[in-house]
Image: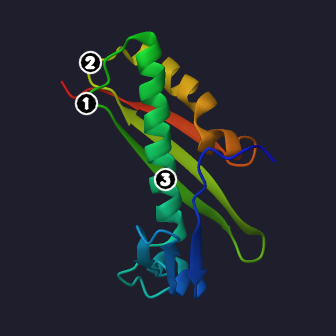
Amino acid sequence: MSTAVYTASATSWGGRTGKVVTSDNKLDLDLSIPAEMGGDGGAGTNPEQLFASGWAACFHNALKGVARQRKVNVTDSAVSLEVHLVGGMATGFDFEVTIEAQLPGVDSVVAQEMLEAAHQVCPYSRATRGNIPVTLVVVPDED
């Protein structure tokens, strides 16, 4: 194994209806199963939301790095990530992901190229490549 630059550690108690806490206590969350999955839809978050949040933040940072290299201003940019849980108990569950980026003032062709480049360097994208179908979408500017 390579030498780690940083290690994140979290522990779950109770699975999807329990809680999750990071080793430094910066994240301490209750978990609930969404109603769409047969749960009570309680106030807690769920693993899919945590996965989407982490990947969105990481991807956005990768996108900002690509923009810096290309000298493109992405100051007002935003990245949204949807994690779709597909399948079922009989066949098993899988993820499908949609990554949407808002890059105001950036040409749509350049923006799409930047998304593709960020997808090549983002650690979440690299770790899941070939395992999770990912759709990259540039959100058009609102004129």
The mark found on residue 54 in the picture is: 3
| Amino acid, disc 3 | Gly
**Amino acid type, mark 2:** Gly
Which element carries disc 3, helix, strand or loop?
A: helix
Q: Most extreme residue toward the top, as rendered?
A: 71
Helix, strand or loop at mark 2: loop
In the rendered image, residue 19, in percent from the top left (x then y), is placed at 49, 82
In the picture, the quarter occupied by the C terminus is top left
> How would you rate the neighbour count of disc 2 (Cα within 10 Å): few for under 14, some for 14-19, many for 20 or more?
some
Report the residue at 27% width, 24% height from top.
104
| Image coordinates for residue 133, horizontal then vertical, percent | 66, 44
With 77 as the anchor, is 49 left or right in this view? right
Which labelled disc corresponds to residue 53?
Answer: none
Contact check, label 1 and label 2, Cβ < 8 Å? yes
Against 73, residue 54 (above or below) is below
Q: Closer to the N terminus: mark 2 or mark 3? A: 3
Whole-Å distance between the Cαs marked 2 and 3?
Answer: 26 Å
In the rendered image, residue 94, in percent from the top left (x then y), is placed at 69, 61
Binning the other alpha carbons within 10 Å of mark 3 as few (below 14), some (14 to 19) or many (20 upward) gives some
Three-letter code for the amino acid on which mark 1 is drawn: Asp
| Alpha-carbon span between mark 1 and mark 3 | 19 Å
| CA neighbours of label 1 inside 10 A, class few (<14), some (14 to 19), many (20+) | few
Query: Residue 76, labelled with which disc?
Result: 1
Q: Which residue, given by chain and number where applicable, does mark 2 sit on?
A: 105
- Closest to the observer: 37 or 66? 66
Sequence-wise, which precedes: disc 1 or disc 2? 1
